[in-house]
Image (spheres, grey):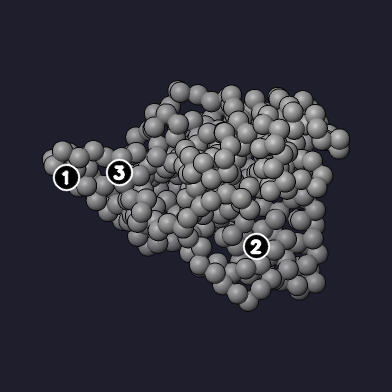
């Protein structure tokens, strides 16, 4: 779900070229779900290998990562760990929603309503353990680092950005800002031409950058107040929020009452599944780790080809082309790094 702040959050479109030379912590589960949703046939059928195993996520991971590295971006993927106990309600809701979508997908497909079937199929996408394991294995072969978060991947990605180990966090959700990420890059995994659901209209999706400092300055609030605002609207830890309170109303309440506690006290209809302060604590003091290393290296072509082509029936020609983009991207990064060091510059995270 993620907190729905888009209505009041300042952002700007950027080209991938503007991110060249930058290191970005990508919310792995977030992009893998996008690959599983988008990379499908016309009737909503995902890509599968000869054994019937879904491979849409592997396809997206290979080709999108290759494009990022070719553009000079150094991605590090951050995987979710154990979700906070407070997220239980939202996790259950998502499971129910995916099952309902799956049933509607099967019905629409049987009845020949293929475009409608594709919409339901996208909503039914589910990330299995074997998909996560396969994604990590592919990243290892590709020479791309990944970090295992103890809990929320977005929290860990934000932590990497706060420490300066990466330049920005990448996710579709605005939760990264509540977790303290100084910069958020959206649309990293879905850049390009996209068809709008149930319409014969195509749009061009570009990366979008949001800077926490600009957000707080323009809204005239602190990060703690941004967290309070998110909680009033609804987060993964209190999905329903407060009835009738959207982003603009929540902003007014936060600016009027200053703190979450005072805002809640003055809202007669306010109801929370748990004490609001506990929800705020998840964002302000998240469970993260400093036990990680990040190192990019030349891909093991034989490993990638054996895994994707040998085990999952990928086209060797296309895989080799993607590997060529990765190698070329790394070479350009190395050349740039050498030149900057030679002329007294520094390489930015």
Residue at image coords 52%, 58%: 190
Specify whether residue 91 is in view.
no
- Furthest toward the front, the residue is 256
Residue 342 against residue 108 in the figure, above or below: above
The x, y position of residue 287, in whole percent, is 58, 24
Q: In the picture shown, does residue 187 fall above or below 345?
A: below
Residue position for label 2: 45
**Label 3 crowd bin: few (<14), some (14–19), many (20+), radius 10 Å:** some
Viewer-side label of 2, 1: 1
Closer to the camera, 250 or 177? 250
Displayed quadrant of residue 89: top right
Label annotation for residue 339: 1
> Dot 3 corresponds to which residue?
298
Query: Under tag 1, what secondary structure?
Result: helix
Q: How crowded is mark 1: few (under 14 residues within 10 Å), some or many (20 or more)?
A: some
**Marks 1 and 3, the one that precedes in the sequence:** 3
Identity of the residue drawn at 62% across and 68% down: 196
**Would you say the residues marked 2 and 1 are in contact, meaning their CB atoms lie under 8 Å apart?**
no
**Element type at marker 3?**
loop
- The CA distance from mark 1 to mark 3 is 20 Å
- Whether residue 167 is visible, yes or no, is yes
Give coordinates of residue 220: x percent, y percent.
57, 40
Q: Check whether the beta carbons of the residues at disc 1 and disc 3 lie within 8 A of each other.
A: no
Percent x, y of residue 35: 56, 54
* 40, 335: nearer the viewer: 335
Report crowding for label 2: few under 14, some 14 to 19, many 20 or more residues within 10 A (C-alpha).
some
**Quadrant where the image shows the C terminus:** top left
């Amino acid at each position: 779900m993620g907190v729905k702040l888009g209505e009041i959050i300042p952002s700007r479109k950027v080209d991938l070229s503007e991110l060249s030379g930058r290191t970005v912590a990508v919310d792995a589960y977030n992009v893998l779900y996008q690959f599983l949703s988008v990379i499908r046939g016309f009737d909503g059928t995902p890509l599968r290998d000869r054994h019937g195993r879904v491979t849409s996520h592997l396809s997206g991971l290979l080709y999108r990562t290759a494009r990022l590295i070719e553009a000079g971006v150094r991605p590090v993927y951050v995987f979710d760990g154990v979700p906070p106990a407070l997220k239980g309600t939202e996790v259950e809701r998502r499971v129910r929603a995916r099952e309902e979508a799956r049933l509607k997908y099967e019905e629409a497909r049987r009845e020949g309503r293929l475009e409608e079937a594709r919409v339901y199929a996208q909503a039914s996408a589910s990330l299995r353990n074997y998909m996560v394991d396969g994604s990590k294995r592919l990243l290892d072969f590709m020479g791309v680092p990944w970090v295992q978060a103890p809990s929320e991947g977005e929290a860990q990605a934000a932590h990497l950005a706060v420490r300066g180990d990466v330049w920005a966090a990448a996710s579709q959700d605005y939760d990264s800002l509540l977790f303290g990420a100084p910069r958020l890059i959206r649309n990293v995994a879905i850049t390009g031409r996209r068809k709008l659901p149930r319409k014969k209209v195509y749009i061009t999706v570009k990366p979008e950058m949001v800077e926490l400092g600009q957000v707080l300055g323009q809204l005239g609030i602190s990060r703690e107040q941004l967290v309070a605002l998110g909680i009033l609207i609804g987060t993964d830890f209190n999905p329903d929020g407060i009835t009738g309170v959207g982003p603009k109303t929540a902003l007014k309440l936060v600016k009027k009452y200053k703190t979450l506690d005072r805002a809640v006290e003055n809202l007669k209809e306010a109801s929370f599944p748990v004490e609001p302060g506990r929800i705020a604590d998840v964002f302000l003091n998240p469970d993260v780790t400093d036990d990680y290393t990040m190192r990019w290296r030349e891909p093991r072509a034989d490993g990638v080809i054996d895994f994707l082509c040998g085990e999952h029936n990928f086209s060797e020609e296309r895989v080799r082309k993607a590997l060529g983009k990765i190698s070329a991207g790394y070479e350009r990064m190395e050349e740039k790094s050498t030149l900057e060091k030679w002329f007294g510059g520094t390489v930015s995270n």
